[in-house]
Image (cartoon, rainbow, N blue to C red):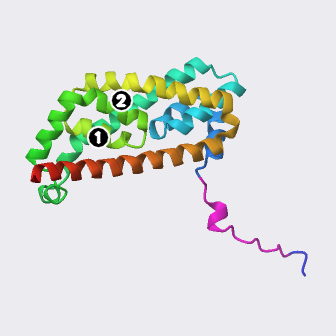
Amino acid sequence: MCPCRRPRRRPASRAESAPVFTTDAVMQMIQTHGLWLIFALAIIEGPIVTVIAAYVAGLSTLNIYVVFWVLVVADLVGDLILYMVGRFGRGWIPQSWQKKLGFNGHRQDRLDSHFQRQGGRTLIIGKLTHSAGMFVLMASGASRMPVARFLFFNFIATLPKTLFFLMIGYSLGYAYKSIDSYIYRASLIVLVLLVVGGVIWIYRRRGKGAS
């Protein structure tokens, strides 16, 4: 082979060149960028980011108390975004699609009535179960629940939830991959139970109405 010719490099495959957003990547980014990145990531995904952030705080100079409050504020910001989507998102949906999706005045009145009477309890349960959190937060916005009341009950639910995952991360954060898997499985199980319970509740209510 001629020494002046360079060997051709094999082009990197898509799997090799594409960045993968994994728990390892989150771990490295938090170690590099600190509190600002913790805040940004916790808005999108709370539990596993909380676990990793607490673990990093135990390994570095990050103050665990500051990390806690950054996570709490980030969680509330993420919740407020979903609230706003629920509150203003319906106006972006054409009337024809709203009818197909079952949105009507009667259901809106029922939703408003529910959150007026049991909005606080619904928010706390939705936050603590995690699986139903997104739907509950958007429903609270669709019901026009007052923002101050919404944030108050969310704050109450966020404190113990964040503290729980923070303690897990601080003490067992080295197993963050396994913890992420457990969080996913637990959330999926809770979601299935909620769906099954909701279907049973609707079926029984219709049965009582028919009788």
Residue bearing mark 2: 124
Q: Nearer the viewer, mark 1 or mark 2?
A: 2
Picture layout, residue 101 above or below residue 30 = below
Which residue does the numbered mark 1 point to in the structure image? Answer: 138
In the displayed structure image, the side of residue 146 where residue 31 appears, left or right:
right
Residue at 39%, 31% (x, y): give it.
77
Res 74 → quadrant: top left
Give the crowd class for mark 1: few <14, some 14-19, many >=20 residues within 10 Å.
many
**Residue at position x 19%, y 57% in the image:** 101
Q: Which residues are magenta?
A: 5-20
Q: Residue 115, how many percent across, how many down?
A: 21, 32
Residue 93 locus on image (x, y percent): 19, 53
What separation in Å lies between label 1 and label 2 (alpha carbons)?
A: 14 Å
Residue 166 counted in the magenta span: no
Give the camera-side residue of 29 and 134.
134
- Residue 145, horizontal then vertical, whole percent: 21, 30
